[in-house]
Image (cartoon, helix red, strand yellow):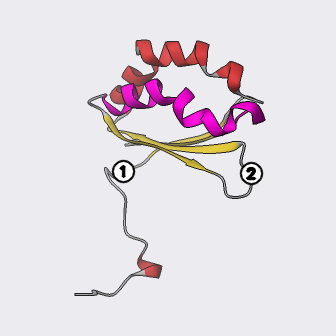
Amino acid sequence: MIFITAKFRVLPDYADRWPEIAGDFTRATRAESGCLWFDWSRSVDDPTEYVLVEAFRDGDAGAAHVQSEHFRTAQRTLPPHLAETPRIVNMTIPQDDWSELGEMAVPDRG
């Protein structure tokens, strides 16, 4: 899968509204057949920073994402709300879902 983490620093005036501002893009991306997940989180240290964790089935799914109309729309509509160019880590990894963090295994509570 293609695994991506990106940090978006949003202008302070838009920080509280970022999930709404990015909402159409988020919904359209999640609806893509090759999207495994597309999840936003807000930094606990910096209220203007959002972290996006996303994954796509493979390179073809990733390419379809960046070639989509909703991606092109986001390229035009999201940057005016940002304080800087987003930073990204993008890796291809040989798995298709999250792995368990064995070092913090939770015992069966049943």
Residue 65, picture quadrant: top left
Q: Residues within 10 Å of mark 2 (few under 14, many from 20)?
A: few
Q: Give the secondary structure at mark 1.
A: loop
Residue stretch in magenta: 10-31
When the figure is inspected, residue 12 is found, relative to residue 105, above or below; the finding is above
> Label 1 sits on what residue type?
Pro
> Label 2 sits on what residue type?
Asp
Residue 32, picture quadrant: top left
Residue at horizontal 45%, vertical 41%?
54
Q: Is residue 95 left or right of residue 88?
A: left
Residue at horizontal 37%, vertical 58%?
98
Q: Give x and y (percent) for residue 44.
A: 67, 58
Residue at horizontal 37%, vertical 63%?
99
Q: Is residue 40 left or right of residue 105?
A: right
Quadrant into which the N terminus falls: top left
When the figure is inspected, residue 15 is found, relative to residue 72, above or below; the finding is below
Residues 66 and 48: in front is 48
Q: Is residue 23 left or right of residue 18?
A: left
Which residue matches tag 1?
Answer: 94
Residues 88 and 81: in front is 81
Which residue matches tag 2?
Answer: 46
Q: Is residue 66 left or right of residue 82?
A: left
